Image: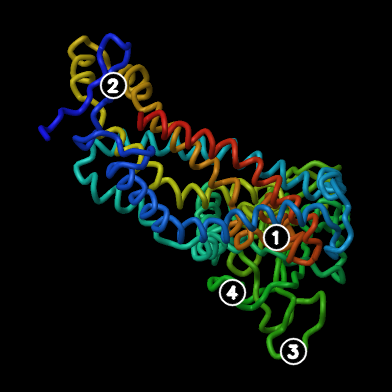
Amino acid sequence: MPATAPAVPPASAGGTPPAPHPSGGRSAPGGGDGPRRRAQRRRRLVAALFLLPALLLLGALVAYPILFSVGRSLFDATGTRFVGADNYVEMFRDPTTLKAVRNSAIWVVAAPALLTGLGLILAVLTEKVRWATAFKLLMFMPMAISFLAAGIIFRITYEQDPDRGVLNAVAVGVHDVFADRPAYPGARAREEGGVTEEKDGSYGTAADLSPGGTVALGIVGVPPKEVPAEAEPAAAPAADGGSGDALTGTVYLDFTPGGGGEPGRIDDGERGLPGLTVQAVRDGTVVGETTTAADGSFRLAGLADGSYAVRLPASNFAEPYGGVSWLGPALVTPAIIGAYLWIWTGFSMVLIGAGLSAMPRDVLEAARMDGANEWQIFRRITVPLLAPVLTVVFVTLVINVMKVFDLVYIIAPGPVLQDANVLAMQMWLVSFGGGNNQGLGSAIGVLLLLLVVPAMIFNIRRFQRSRR
């Protein structure tokens, strides 16, 4: 039989010929998948297999701890009794936690702003430095140091003892340039010689001395090694042989090497104390002043007839300037923020410097040709063009400072730890550092998470916008 052509539906029936399959043929009967869809499924399956280990780790290390912490925050310290929101209520009633919230707020306000500003200034100035690469390397180097090591470094740097703390050694050195050091800190006058201590810490005799008289003032509490090398043996004071208008005397160390001697009297081997300020006082007013010689002798001249007292001012015996209490209750938080700035300034500078290097230079040159000075270029061109980079750096640092723990734990001494406390530290103290209340600690952890999440969402959305 002759072959017959396949029937084609007429166009007048209102139908249209079936569309060709993307692979070149027609769709498979029964709606089956074509080769392209099967390839797409294979690619998705391969991607899912590669993502599965990461998803498992993310779930085990991030998602599960978050969910467990939220659930644990609803139970008491033992973890057996459901207490609902009681831990959250207790958290905001606890003054220690409120202080931690306040300190964390100080960190969030101060540290990211200072770091972003310092990074911007250094990045701009570094462009004009010949050895820019070496400078950036030097500034970035603290990032290679762990927070534990950096905390130990700054704990020593902030030491109160000037012999150990670098900052106080500098502070004491500068102070002593402009102010006199006490002659004999911690010393005192021996009261057996008729000397009494006054309210301001000075020592004085009774007001019964007249010009031409003498007085011997014994001092104790001076270690032998603190006696100046130029000190000479003390001699009993001699009456003024001049015009008769002077009081004379000797200030000596009332201590006989090897023992013996009589208190209140100058014995053989006892030395005078040079450099002491001595005043003549009449009716509560200082009318004469002098300094003791190498053998401790002094002469208060130009005195009119009358009765006087001889006084050793408290400045002779005051404790020397010991520097700033960097780790005291008032300055411990700013001091720790200073250590944090030392570590993270290089990070901020390098990121902002990368954005600065990508900035179009023709805009800056055009501004210079129009007569703009460097400050105007910085304020009106550089900063606006760097705004996206500055925002990313600032938000990243906000997230980071919310979690600061190591520096506070290492630098702050035990007595002022509560004054430097932050949320991450409080969470650890409540849960493991003696509080043993992991329900309350989990509630603080959830609070910390809720405070960090908005900054993270902001950063993620900004990355997505910049990618588009």
Choose between 67 and 335: the one closer to the eye.
Answer: 67
Identity of the residue furthest to the left in this view: 2
How many residues crowd mark 2 within 10 Å: few (<14), some (14–19), many (20+)?
few
The quarter in which the C terminus is drawn is top left
Closer to the eye: label 2 or 1:
1
Q: Which three-letter amino acid code belongs to the residue tagged 3?
A: Gly
C-alpha span from label 1 to label 4: 62 Å
> Residue at horizontal 49%, vertical 47%?
341
Residue where numbered disc 4 is placed:
232
- Position in image of residue 86 (x %, y %): 87, 48
Q: Please state which of residues 294 and 30 is positioned toward the viewer in this rendering.
A: 30
Q: Which mark is residue 374?
A: 2
Mark 1 highlights which residue?
A: 428
Determine the secondary structure under disc 2: helix
Label 2 vs label 4: CA separation?
A: 66 Å
Callout 4: SS: loop
Q: At numbered mark 3, what does the secondary structure look like: helix, strand or loop? A: loop
Residue drawn at x 64%, y 46% as measured from the top left: 449
